[in-house]
Image: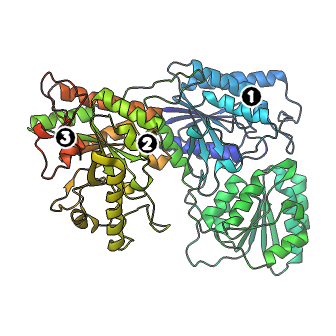
């Protein structure tokens, strides 16, 4: 269990608080101790089991005047109140003693509250041990018009370990609204959309829909839409309307709406079963706030979107137009909103329903990303360029598995494969330096059609390096709904044979005598009937993630111990999980392959790999299992005895890691 602190201040509506609260619930449900610090106006927040809520002296604004902070009575905020907020936030941090701190929107927004957030960041940086510091942002940001403000945001991000982007880059990437500079890109972690009401209110297939549901969010910003809807209802007496009004709309305005409503319209306050209403509605008319769109995506309701654009706001318009561009809704611009235009929009043929593949499991994925970072050896460097190392990996389960194998008289063979090599890069230099320092021979799975001359040139004088055939062009030929594959079952066997033969010929021409005729299918996926045809083409080995039925003349050695957290957007996966997978592979028998990807690994992943390789090499040098083998030995046909296999780590008593080897690798 870890301790998590989330700091948020909502000002216009409750969207920021809703998203932060959803994250808090997800962390608590995963067993973490959570402190949620809220600085906006108090809002009833149900289902906070396991979450400690700290309310700072609240602030609010009127309209979109974000720089004019008011107290709950509408009076300009005093310096004393701001100091009390700052001190309360720092005190909450001290009491929570968190392992991770998440600031919602800041430093991308809430610049008016910079003093209190700066105090929190400074408390994080001076704490021992230093907690992770993460920013939490929605899919779209308001980009400042002044470049110095953008630069200031990027400078403040130097103190942060990562940025949780609560959106789907395949639908709407962050760079659609914010400039992604070189220093920012490695910190981004896309989570998918954070759905407050996950699993609620989804209509059953074929269930009839009826009526129009109008919503304008929780704030008074939706009042113009609600007024237009009341008037449009009077123009469409054959249609039934339900107009929901946010709790922040003053009572006199709410009463005026109810009084003006025609008989075919119901005007009521926002309801907790909003998503269920949408699931049964023939049409939704709404603004395009983050949480409203999640309600639409989950309910599948056809939608007319009227994005909020007052005060030069661009967030909702961009989100609405993106949905429309994907064929998911129709847009009525706010400056074109009248009773007549809205009535015309709802009388027209209904827009498409929200059928989509947009990731909406952002709360769960956010927890997974933070958990992986908490287990990482070393987060990104701080503003001074120094890392903040966390705990060392616990290799005990792997050590115990190796000890059991030794007690049973089994010598475990380990080998190292690195995928996606195409050229001489700084990352490749780092990989080869790690191999040389630890004494581990590495097999580079190179992409033949993309291999540049610089790759073979860089390897000319390197000892203990083999090359494997990593597909043809590492191109995805799968259908959009299928998992990526270049040699997958969706293609004719004749096409697979032709590509495999071309790949081997290209690899031999471009990689030279270091090449082993071993196929590494991209994404570790391949058609079940592919292995049987490989020996006839000239291959003598296959390496993927798991063994298949034996094929005469085809050696198999697979690599499944991958430290990269692919499903969470990259970075280091949970070290305990990596070690556990390695221990299970040792227990299962056969060669155990460690897999890296030098082109995409972050600092934490490099550091973990270095410690793992050092740990295993030290065991081998002391004469205990394992044996560290070169790929040339594993894929020899027939397999070579250990004594003839070249640069292998035999683990003899008193032996030291080999640094060079002249055995041919062709």
The one of 659 and 623 positioned closer to us in this rendering: 659
Q: How is the image coloured?
A: rainbow
594 to 377, vertically: above or below = below
Left or right: 573, with 116 as reference point: left
Distance in Å between CA atoms under marks 1 and 2: 48 Å
- Say which mark, if any, is on residue 114: 1
Query: Dot 1, crowdedness within 10 Å: few (<14), some or many (≥20)?
Result: some
Looking at the image, which residue is at 45% across and 62% down?
476
The secondary element bearing badge 3 is classed as strand
Mark 1 or 3, nearer chain start: 1
Residue at horizontal 31 percent and vertical 38 percent from the top? 579
Residue drawn at (20%, 49%) of the image:
635
The single residue placed furthest to the bottom in the displayed view is 238
Q: CA distance from mark 3 to mark 2?
A: 32 Å
Return the residue at label 2.
454
Is residue 591 visible in the rendered image? The answer is no
For mark 3, what is the residue?
A: 413
């Amino acid at each position: 269990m870890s301790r998590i602190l989330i700091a948020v201040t909502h000002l216009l509506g409750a969207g920021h608080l809703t998203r932060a609260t959803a994250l808090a619930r997800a962390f608590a449900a995963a067993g973490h101790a959570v402190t949620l610090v809220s600085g906006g106006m108090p809002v009833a927040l149900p289902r906070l089991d396991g979450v400690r809520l700290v309310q700072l002296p609240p602030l609010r604004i009127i309209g979109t005047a974000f720089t004019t902070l008011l107290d709950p009575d509408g009076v300009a905020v005093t310096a004393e109140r701001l100091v009390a907020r700052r001190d309360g936030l720092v005190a909450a941090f001290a009491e929570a003693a968190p392992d991770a701190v998440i600031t919602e929107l800041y430093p991308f927004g809430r610049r008016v509250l910079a003093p209190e957030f700066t105090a929190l960041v400074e408390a994080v940086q001076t704490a021992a041990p230093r907690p992770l510091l993460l920013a939490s942002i929605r899919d779209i940001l308001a980009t400042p018009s002044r470049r110095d403000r953008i630069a200031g945001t990027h400078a403040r991000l130097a103190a942060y370990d990562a940025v949780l982007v609560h959106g789907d880059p395949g639908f709407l990437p962050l760079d659609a609204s914010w400039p992604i500079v070189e220093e920012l890109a490695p910190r981004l972690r896309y989570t998918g959309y954070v759905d407050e009401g996950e699993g609620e209110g989804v209509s059953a297939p074929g269930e009839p829909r009826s009526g129009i549901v109008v919503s304008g969010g929780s704030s008074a910003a939706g009042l113009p839409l609600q007024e237009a809807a009341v008037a449009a209802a009077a123009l469409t007496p054959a249609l039934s309307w339900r107009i929901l009004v946010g709790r922040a709309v003053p009572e006199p305005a709410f009463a005026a709406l109810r009084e003006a409503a025609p008989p075919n319209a119901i005007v009521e306050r926002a309801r907790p079963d909003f998503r269920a209403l949408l699931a049964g509605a023939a049409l939704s008319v709404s603004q395009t706030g983050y949480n409203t769109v999640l309600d639409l995506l989950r309910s599948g309701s056809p939608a007319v979107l009227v994005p909020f654009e007052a005060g030069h706001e661009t967030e909702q318009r961009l989100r609405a137009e993106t949905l429309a561009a994907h064929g998911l809704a129709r847009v009525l611009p706010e400056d074109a909103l009248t009773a007549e235009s809205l009535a015309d929009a709802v009388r027209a043929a209904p827009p498409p329903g929200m059928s989509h593949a947009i990731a909406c499991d952002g709360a769960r994925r956010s927890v997974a990303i933070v958990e992986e970072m908490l287990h990482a050896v070393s987060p990104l460097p701080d503003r001074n360029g120094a890392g903040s190392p966390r705990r060392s990996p616990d290799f005990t389960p792997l050590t115990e598995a190796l000890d059991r194998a030794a007690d049973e008289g089994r010598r475990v063979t380990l080998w190292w494969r690195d995928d996606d090599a195409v050229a001489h890069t700084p990352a490749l230099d780092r990989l080869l330096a790690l191999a040389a320092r630890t004494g581990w021979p590495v097999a580079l799975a190179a992409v033949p059609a993309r291999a540049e001359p610089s790759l073979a040139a860089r390897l000319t004088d390197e000892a203990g390096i083999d090359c494997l055939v990593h597909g043809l062009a590492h191109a995805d030929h799968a259908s959009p709904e299928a998992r990526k594959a270049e040699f997958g079952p969706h293609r004719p066997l004749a096409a697979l044979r032709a590509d495999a033969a071309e790949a081997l010929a290209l690899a031999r021409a471009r990689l030279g005598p270091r090449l082993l005729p071993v196929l590494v299918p991209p994404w570790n996926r391949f058609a079940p009937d592919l292995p049987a045809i490989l020996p006839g083409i000239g291959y003598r080995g296959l390496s993927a993630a798991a063994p298949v039925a034996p094929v005469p003349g085809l050696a198999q050695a697979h690599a499944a111990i991958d430290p990269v957290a692919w499903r969470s957007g990259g970075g280091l996966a949970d070290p305990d999980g990596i070690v556990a997978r390695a221990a299970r592979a040792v227990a299962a028998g056969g060669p155990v392959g460690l897999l890296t990807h030098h082109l995409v690994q972050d600092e934490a992943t490099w550091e973990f790999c270095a410690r793992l390789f050092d740990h295993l090499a030290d065991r081998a040098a002391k004469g205990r299992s394992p044996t560290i083998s070169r790929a040339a030995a594993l894929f020899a046909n027939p397999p070579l005895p250990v004594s003839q296999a070249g640069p292998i780590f035999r683990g003899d008593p008193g032996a030291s890691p080999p640094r060079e080897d002249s055995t041919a690798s062709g």
